[in-house]
């Protein structure tokens, strides 16, 4: 599903170059649930941006679902691949405040040019799948943190992406809500969805099936936790 070979990334800082990713080699198979951990400055956010086609490696090879991803892609093609292959879940939820839950979930379908009646029908199905069918008309400020994150997960799933990329998805949640969200992500994974979670929380990482530790731009360790993780 995902293949990274010798991924290198630099950032210009004044007259100097900061070497952020120093030869990342990583393969992720379909159906895996992988945690990416690392301290601040380890390169995990940069890696996530490259995986999410929000940035590009300076050298190396990135293959996503048999498609080569790189700087040669046009912005339109990059956006098309993001919408087709990837679903995003963020720590801050990134819901649109003036749209209700249903409209937030339906938004990615708008960019796929699906008619409004049909996209609302699909969005309602996904809201029901995360247990929020009765909150479809609620605005984000009328939802709890856990409910907002479940709306965000429904939005990430609505286009049937190949991979879910979650950036600190429990960082703004209390322990009980973290448990609930992780249980739901495990359920999605057990149904076959590939999930990558960037987190600094070891308790969250331990609920994944594999943990990749980054340090100073390299993979320090890559550990299989379980093939059948249950909370």
Image (cartoon, grey):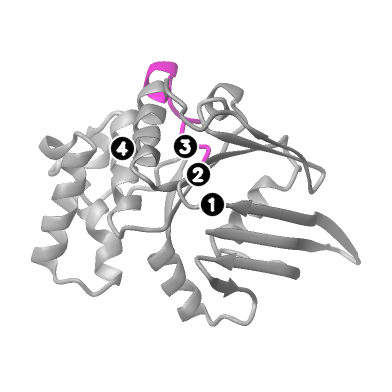
Q: CA distance from mark 2 to mark 3?
A: 17 Å
How many residues crowd around disc 4 within 10 Å: few (fewer than 14), some, or many (20 or more)? Answer: many
If you read the primary sequence from the N terminus, does the residue marked by circle 2 or circle 3 appear first? 2
Viewer-side label of 1, 4? 1
Q: Label 1 belongs to which residue? A: 29
Labelled pair 1, 2 in contact (Cβ < 8 Å): yes
Which residue is labeled 3 in the image?
A: 169
Q: Quadrant of residue 106?
A: bottom left
Give the Cα separation between the discs numbered 3 and 4.
10 Å
**Observer-nearest residue: 158 or 151?**
158
| Quadrant of res 19 | bottom right
Whether tag 3 and tag 4 are in contact, CB under 8 A, the answer is no
Write down the region rendered in magenta: 166-178
Tell me where residue 32 appears, x and y as whole percent. Answer: 50, 44
**What is the quadrant of residue 59 in the picture?**
bottom right
Q: Secondary structure at mark 2?
A: loop
Would you call the spot at circle 3 few (<14 residues within 10 Å), some (14-19), or many (20 or more)? many
* Side (left or right) of 14 relative to 74: right
Ranked by sequence position, the earlier of labels 3 and 4 is 4
Which residue matches tag 4?
A: 150
Q: Residue visible at 53% across and 27% down?
A: 204
Residue linked to disc 2? 32
Q: Secondary structure at mark 4?
A: helix
Which residue appears at 56% of the width and 25% of the height? 206
Local secondary structure at mark 1? loop
């Amino acid at each position: 599903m995902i293949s990274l070979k010798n991924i290198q990334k630099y950032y210009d800082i004044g007259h100097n170059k900061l070497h952020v990713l120093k030869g990342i080699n990583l393969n992720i198979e379909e159906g895996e649930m992988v945690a990416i951990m690392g301290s601040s400055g380890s390169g995990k956010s940069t890696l996530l941006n490259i995986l999410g086609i929000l940035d590009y490696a300076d050298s190396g090879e990135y293959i996503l679902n048999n498609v080569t991803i790189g700087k040669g892609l046009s912005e339109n093609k990059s956006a098309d691949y993001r919408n087709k292959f990837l679903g995003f879940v963020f720590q801050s939820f990134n819901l649109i405040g003036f749209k209700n839950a249903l409209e937030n979930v339906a938004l990615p379908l708008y960019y796929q040019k699906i008619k409004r009646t049909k996209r609302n029908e699909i969005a309602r199905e996904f809201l029901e799948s995360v247990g929020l069918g009765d909150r479809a008309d609620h605005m984000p400020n009328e939802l709890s943190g856990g409910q907002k994150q479940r709306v965000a997960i429904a939005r990430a799933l609505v286009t049937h992406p190949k991979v879910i990329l979650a950036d600190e998805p429990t960082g703004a949640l209390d322990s009980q809500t973290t448990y609930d969200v992780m249980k739901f992500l495990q359920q999605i994974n057990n149904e076959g969805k590939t999930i990558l979670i960037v987190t600094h929380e070891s308790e969250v990482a331990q609920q994944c099936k594999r943990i990749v530790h980054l340090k100073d731009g390299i993979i320090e360790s890559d550990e299989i936790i379980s093939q059948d993780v249950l909370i």
